[in-house]
Amino acid sequence: MTRFKWHELPDVVRESVQSHLGPVTVVRHVEQGQNCNLALVLRSEERDVFLKGVRGVSPQMRWLRNEVEAGPLAPGVAPAACFSEDVDADALWFVAGFEYLNGRPADLSPESDDLNVVRSVLAKLNSLSGGSTQPLTIRWAKTDWWQKFAVEAPERADGLDIDELTAACRHTPELVGGDALLHTDLHEHQFMIDGDSVRVIDWGRPASGAPWVDTAFMVVRLIAAGFEPREAEVWGASVPRWSTGTEHAVTAFACYVAGLWAYRAVTTPFPGATRLSDAATAYAHFRLAR
Protein backbone atom coordinates (compact mmCIF):
# COMPACT_ATOMS: atom_id res chain seq x y z
CA MET A 1 0.00 0.00 0.00
CA THR A 2 1.17 3.54 -0.76
CA ARG A 3 2.56 5.19 2.37
CA PHE A 4 1.88 8.87 2.97
CA LYS A 5 4.04 11.18 5.04
CA TRP A 6 2.41 13.79 7.24
CA HIS A 7 3.00 16.64 4.80
CA GLU A 8 1.60 14.57 1.92
CA LEU A 9 -1.82 14.11 3.50
CA PRO A 10 -4.84 16.07 2.28
CA ASP A 11 -5.30 19.21 4.37
CA VAL A 12 -8.64 18.00 5.68
CA VAL A 13 -7.06 14.81 7.04
CA ARG A 14 -4.37 16.72 8.92
CA GLU A 15 -6.99 19.14 10.23
CA SER A 16 -9.11 16.24 11.47
CA VAL A 17 -6.19 14.76 13.41
CA GLN A 18 -5.29 18.11 14.94
CA SER A 19 -8.89 18.68 16.00
CA HIS A 20 -8.32 15.81 18.42
CA LEU A 21 -4.75 16.54 19.44
CA GLY A 22 -4.10 20.21 18.85
CA PRO A 23 -0.86 21.26 17.15
CA VAL A 24 1.42 18.30 16.61
CA THR A 25 5.02 17.48 15.82
CA VAL A 26 5.96 14.42 13.81
CA VAL A 27 8.25 12.26 15.90
CA ARG A 28 8.88 9.60 13.27
CA HIS A 29 7.33 7.79 10.35
CA VAL A 30 6.87 4.06 10.91
CA GLU A 31 7.91 1.91 7.96
CA GLN A 32 6.84 -1.47 9.36
CA GLY A 33 3.48 -2.96 8.51
CA GLN A 34 1.78 -3.59 5.20
CA ASN A 35 -1.87 -2.80 5.81
CA CYS A 36 -2.13 0.96 6.18
CA ASN A 37 -1.40 4.10 4.18
CA LEU A 38 -0.35 6.12 7.18
CA ALA A 39 1.68 5.11 10.23
CA LEU A 40 3.55 7.63 12.34
CA VAL A 41 4.16 8.83 15.87
CA LEU A 42 2.86 12.29 16.68
CA ARG A 43 3.60 14.45 19.71
CA SER A 44 1.15 16.98 21.08
CA GLU A 45 1.34 19.06 24.24
CA GLU A 46 -0.47 16.36 26.19
CA ARG A 47 0.80 13.04 24.82
CA ASP A 48 2.43 10.95 22.12
CA VAL A 49 0.05 9.13 19.80
CA PHE A 50 0.54 6.39 17.24
CA LEU A 51 -1.50 7.45 14.21
CA LYS A 52 -2.69 4.98 11.58
CA GLY A 53 -4.78 5.65 8.52
CA VAL A 54 -6.25 3.87 5.51
CA ARG A 55 -7.34 5.54 2.30
CA GLY A 56 -10.32 4.05 0.48
CA VAL A 57 -12.87 1.44 1.50
CA SER A 58 -11.06 -1.89 1.65
CA PRO A 59 -10.41 -4.89 3.89
CA GLN A 60 -7.54 -2.89 5.38
CA MET A 61 -9.98 -0.18 6.47
CA ARG A 62 -12.11 -2.82 8.16
CA TRP A 63 -9.05 -4.20 9.91
CA LEU A 64 -8.15 -0.77 11.25
CA ARG A 65 -11.70 -0.35 12.56
CA ASN A 66 -11.25 -3.71 14.27
CA GLU A 67 -8.13 -2.40 15.99
CA VAL A 68 -10.10 0.52 17.38
CA GLU A 69 -12.78 -1.84 18.67
CA ALA A 70 -10.26 -4.24 20.26
CA GLY A 71 -9.27 -1.92 23.11
CA PRO A 72 -12.42 -2.52 25.17
CA LEU A 73 -12.28 -6.27 24.43
CA ALA A 74 -8.77 -6.64 25.84
CA PRO A 75 -8.29 -3.76 28.30
CA GLY A 76 -4.73 -3.38 29.48
CA VAL A 77 -3.53 -5.72 26.71
CA ALA A 78 -4.60 -4.12 23.43
CA PRO A 79 -3.65 -0.46 22.86
CA ALA A 80 -6.46 1.95 23.71
CA ALA A 81 -7.80 4.11 20.90
CA CYS A 82 -7.57 7.83 21.68
CA PHE A 83 -9.76 8.84 18.74
CA SER A 84 -10.93 7.69 15.32
CA GLU A 85 -12.72 9.42 12.48
CA ASP A 86 -13.89 9.00 8.90
CA VAL A 87 -12.64 11.87 6.75
CA ASP A 88 -14.00 12.65 3.29
CA ALA A 89 -11.00 13.94 1.35
CA ASP A 90 -9.65 12.87 -2.08
CA ALA A 91 -11.16 9.53 -1.05
CA LEU A 92 -12.67 8.29 2.19
CA TRP A 93 -9.98 8.10 4.85
CA PHE A 94 -10.26 6.38 8.20
CA VAL A 95 -7.74 7.64 10.75
CA ALA A 96 -7.20 6.38 14.28
CA GLY A 97 -4.91 7.52 17.06
CA PHE A 98 -3.73 4.97 19.62
CA GLU A 99 -1.83 5.32 22.85
CA TYR A 100 1.85 5.21 22.01
CA LEU A 101 3.64 2.14 23.31
CA ASN A 102 7.39 2.07 23.72
CA GLY A 103 8.73 -1.46 23.82
CA ARG A 104 10.58 -4.25 22.09
CA PRO A 105 9.34 -7.41 20.38
CA ALA A 106 9.45 -10.78 22.10
CA ASP A 107 12.34 -13.20 21.61
CA LEU A 108 10.83 -16.61 20.80
CA SER A 109 14.06 -18.58 20.62
CA PRO A 110 14.15 -21.78 22.71
CA GLU A 111 16.12 -20.43 25.68
CA SER A 112 14.47 -17.00 25.85
CA ASP A 113 13.11 -15.62 29.12
CA ASP A 114 10.43 -13.89 27.06
CA LEU A 115 8.61 -17.21 26.70
CA ASN A 116 7.35 -16.79 30.28
CA VAL A 117 6.02 -13.35 29.37
CA VAL A 118 4.26 -14.69 26.28
CA ARG A 119 2.74 -17.51 28.34
CA SER A 120 1.28 -15.08 30.89
CA VAL A 121 -0.20 -12.88 28.17
CA LEU A 122 -1.80 -15.88 26.47
CA ALA A 123 -3.28 -17.01 29.78
CA LYS A 124 -4.92 -13.61 30.16
CA LEU A 125 -6.18 -13.46 26.58
CA ASN A 126 -7.60 -16.97 26.75
CA SER A 127 -9.85 -15.93 29.61
CA LEU A 128 -11.45 -12.99 27.73
CA SER A 129 -14.70 -13.08 25.81
CA GLY A 130 -14.72 -12.57 22.07
CA GLY A 131 -17.91 -10.58 22.32
CA SER A 132 -19.35 -9.74 18.91
CA THR A 133 -16.16 -10.47 16.94
CA GLN A 134 -16.56 -12.69 13.89
CA PRO A 135 -16.56 -16.40 14.82
CA LEU A 136 -13.49 -18.20 13.53
CA THR A 137 -15.88 -20.95 12.45
CA ILE A 138 -17.28 -18.58 9.82
CA ARG A 139 -13.93 -17.17 8.73
CA TRP A 140 -12.53 -20.66 8.24
CA ALA A 141 -15.51 -22.07 6.35
CA LYS A 142 -13.33 -22.95 3.34
CA THR A 143 -11.24 -26.06 3.89
CA ASP A 144 -9.72 -26.81 0.48
CA TRP A 145 -6.43 -24.92 0.86
CA TRP A 146 -4.26 -27.96 0.21
CA GLN A 147 -6.05 -28.68 -3.06
CA LYS A 148 -5.61 -25.07 -4.14
CA PHE A 149 -1.93 -25.22 -3.16
CA ALA A 150 -1.44 -28.35 -5.29
CA VAL A 151 -2.90 -26.55 -8.30
CA GLU A 152 -0.74 -23.44 -7.79
CA ALA A 153 2.52 -25.19 -6.96
CA PRO A 154 2.43 -28.83 -8.13
CA GLU A 155 6.22 -29.10 -7.87
CA ARG A 156 6.07 -28.21 -4.15
CA ALA A 157 3.08 -30.49 -3.55
CA ASP A 158 4.97 -33.47 -4.95
CA GLY A 159 5.51 -35.96 -2.14
CA LEU A 160 2.70 -34.57 0.04
CA ASP A 161 -0.44 -36.60 0.64
CA ILE A 162 -2.87 -33.86 -0.41
CA ASP A 163 -5.91 -36.08 0.13
CA GLU A 164 -4.87 -36.92 3.70
CA LEU A 165 -4.15 -33.28 4.52
CA THR A 166 -7.43 -32.13 2.99
CA ALA A 167 -9.38 -34.77 4.90
CA ALA A 168 -7.76 -33.66 8.16
CA CYS A 169 -8.99 -30.10 7.51
CA ARG A 170 -12.58 -31.02 6.72
CA HIS A 171 -14.02 -30.51 10.20
CA THR A 172 -11.70 -27.71 11.31
CA PRO A 173 -14.34 -24.93 11.26
CA GLU A 174 -16.55 -26.50 13.91
CA LEU A 175 -13.58 -27.77 15.93
CA VAL A 176 -12.19 -24.24 16.47
CA GLY A 177 -15.57 -22.83 17.54
CA GLY A 178 -15.97 -21.10 20.89
CA ASP A 179 -16.54 -17.75 22.58
CA ALA A 180 -13.01 -16.81 23.69
CA LEU A 181 -11.25 -13.74 22.30
CA LEU A 182 -8.64 -14.64 19.68
CA HIS A 183 -5.99 -12.38 18.17
CA THR A 184 -5.29 -14.89 15.31
CA ASP A 185 -1.99 -13.32 14.24
CA LEU A 186 0.30 -13.49 17.24
CA HIS A 187 4.04 -13.44 16.55
CA GLU A 188 7.11 -11.91 18.13
CA HIS A 189 6.51 -8.42 16.74
CA GLN A 190 2.96 -8.27 18.11
CA PHE A 191 4.29 -8.21 21.67
CA MET A 192 5.54 -4.88 23.03
CA ILE A 193 7.68 -5.54 26.09
CA ASP A 194 8.79 -2.61 28.24
CA GLY A 195 10.15 -3.81 31.55
CA ASP A 196 7.25 -5.39 33.43
CA SER A 197 4.71 -4.00 30.97
CA VAL A 198 3.57 -6.19 28.07
CA ARG A 199 1.02 -5.26 25.44
CA VAL A 200 -0.25 -6.92 22.27
CA ILE A 201 -0.68 -4.82 19.13
CA ASP A 202 -2.20 -5.09 15.62
CA TRP A 203 -5.68 -6.40 16.36
CA GLY A 204 -6.77 -6.22 12.74
CA ARG A 205 -8.39 -9.66 12.60
CA PRO A 206 -9.74 -10.65 16.01
CA ALA A 207 -12.21 -13.50 16.26
CA SER A 208 -14.13 -15.56 18.76
CA GLY A 209 -13.24 -19.20 19.01
CA ALA A 210 -11.79 -22.00 21.12
CA PRO A 211 -9.51 -20.70 23.90
CA TRP A 212 -6.57 -22.90 22.84
CA VAL A 213 -6.33 -21.53 19.29
CA ASP A 214 -4.01 -18.55 19.89
CA THR A 215 -1.65 -20.85 21.78
CA ALA A 216 -1.68 -23.23 18.80
CA PHE A 217 -0.72 -20.34 16.54
CA MET A 218 2.19 -19.61 18.90
CA VAL A 219 3.30 -23.24 18.73
CA VAL A 220 3.79 -22.80 14.98
CA ARG A 221 5.68 -19.55 15.55
CA LEU A 222 7.97 -21.30 18.04
CA ILE A 223 8.77 -23.96 15.45
CA ALA A 224 9.65 -21.18 13.02
CA ALA A 225 11.90 -19.70 15.73
CA GLY A 226 13.90 -22.91 16.16
CA PHE A 227 11.87 -25.26 18.36
CA GLU A 228 11.30 -28.87 17.42
CA PRO A 229 7.55 -29.54 17.03
CA ARG A 230 7.41 -31.73 20.14
CA GLU A 231 9.23 -29.12 22.23
CA ALA A 232 6.97 -26.35 20.96
CA GLU A 233 3.88 -28.35 21.86
CA VAL A 234 5.21 -29.10 25.34
CA TRP A 235 5.51 -25.35 25.81
CA GLY A 236 1.98 -24.88 24.48
CA ALA A 237 0.70 -27.44 26.99
CA SER A 238 1.99 -25.21 29.81
CA VAL A 239 -0.47 -22.46 28.84
CA PRO A 240 -3.79 -22.61 30.70
CA ARG A 241 -6.74 -23.87 28.62
CA TRP A 242 -4.54 -25.61 26.03
CA SER A 243 -5.94 -28.83 27.43
CA THR A 244 -9.45 -27.85 26.27
CA GLY A 245 -8.39 -28.67 22.71
CA THR A 246 -8.88 -32.33 21.79
CA GLU A 247 -6.22 -34.26 19.90
CA HIS A 248 -8.49 -34.32 16.86
CA ALA A 249 -9.11 -30.56 17.02
CA VAL A 250 -5.43 -29.60 17.34
CA THR A 251 -4.46 -31.89 14.44
CA ALA A 252 -7.22 -30.39 12.28
CA PHE A 253 -6.01 -26.89 13.20
CA ALA A 254 -2.40 -27.73 12.32
CA CYS A 255 -3.34 -29.14 8.92
CA TYR A 256 -5.66 -26.25 8.13
CA VAL A 257 -3.13 -23.54 9.00
CA ALA A 258 -0.37 -25.33 7.11
CA GLY A 259 -2.54 -25.51 3.99
CA LEU A 260 -3.67 -21.91 4.25
CA TRP A 261 -0.15 -20.58 4.78
CA ALA A 262 1.34 -22.81 2.07
CA TYR A 263 -1.21 -21.47 -0.40
CA ARG A 264 -0.57 -17.86 0.60
CA ALA A 265 3.19 -18.34 0.41
CA VAL A 266 2.92 -19.14 -3.31
CA THR A 267 0.08 -16.75 -4.24
CA THR A 268 0.59 -13.66 -2.06
CA PRO A 269 4.11 -14.03 -0.67
CA PHE A 270 5.42 -11.76 2.04
CA PRO A 271 8.79 -11.64 3.84
CA GLY A 272 9.27 -14.87 5.75
CA ALA A 273 6.24 -16.58 4.17
CA THR A 274 8.13 -19.71 3.11
CA ARG A 275 9.78 -20.15 6.50
CA LEU A 276 6.43 -19.81 8.24
CA SER A 277 4.73 -22.17 5.79
CA ASP A 278 7.46 -24.76 6.31
CA ALA A 279 7.06 -24.50 10.10
CA ALA A 280 3.29 -24.99 9.87
CA THR A 281 3.73 -27.97 7.54
CA ALA A 282 6.26 -29.52 9.93
CA TYR A 283 3.74 -29.18 12.73
CA ALA A 284 0.97 -30.73 10.63
CA HIS A 285 3.16 -33.74 9.81
CA PHE A 286 4.10 -34.08 13.48
CA ARG A 287 0.43 -34.14 14.46
CA LEU A 288 -0.55 -36.63 11.76
CA ALA A 289 2.24 -39.00 12.80
CA ARG A 290 1.07 -39.22 16.42
Image (cartoon, rainbow, N blue to C red):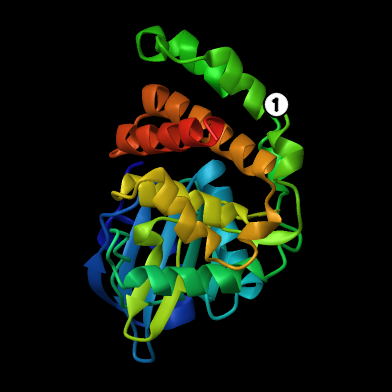
**Circle 1 SS class:** loop
Q: Which residue does the numbered mark 1 point to in the structure image? A: 170
Spot occupied by residue 70 in the image (x, y as percentages of width and height): 60, 66
Q: Residue shown at 59%/78% (left/top)?
A: 75
Pick the front one: 267 or 230? 230
The total number of labels drawn is 1
Q: Residue shown at 62%/56% (left/top)?
A: 212
- Residue furthest bottom in the image: 46
Dot 1 alpha-carbon crowd within 10 angstroms: few under 14, some 14 to 19, many 20 or more: some
Indicate left or right for 14 with 255 as reference. Answer: left
Above/below status of 237 relative to 101: above
Above/below status of 169 relative to 108: above
Spot occupied by residue 276 in the image (x, y as percentages of width and height): 36, 39
Q: Is residue 195 visible?
A: yes
Spot occupied by residue 68 in the image (x, y as percentages of width and height): 57, 66
Which quarter of the figure has residue 251? Answer: top right
Pick the front one: 198 or 166? 166
Spot occupied by residue 243 in the image (x, y as percentages of width and height): 65, 58
Amino acid residing under circle 1: Arg
Q: Is residue 89 visible?
A: no
Above/below status of 99 relative to 51: below
Q: Is the N terminus in the top left, top right, bottom left or bottom right quadrant? A: top left
- Residue furthest front in the image: 290
Q: Residue shown at 34%/85% (left/top)?
A: 44
Above/below status of 140 relative to 235: above
Indicate left or right for 105 with 81 as reference. Answer: left
Q: Residue shown at 40%/55% (left/top)?
A: 187
Indicate left or right for 153 with 233 as reference. Answer: left
Pick the front one: 228 or 218? 228
Which quarter of the figure has residue 51? Answer: bottom left
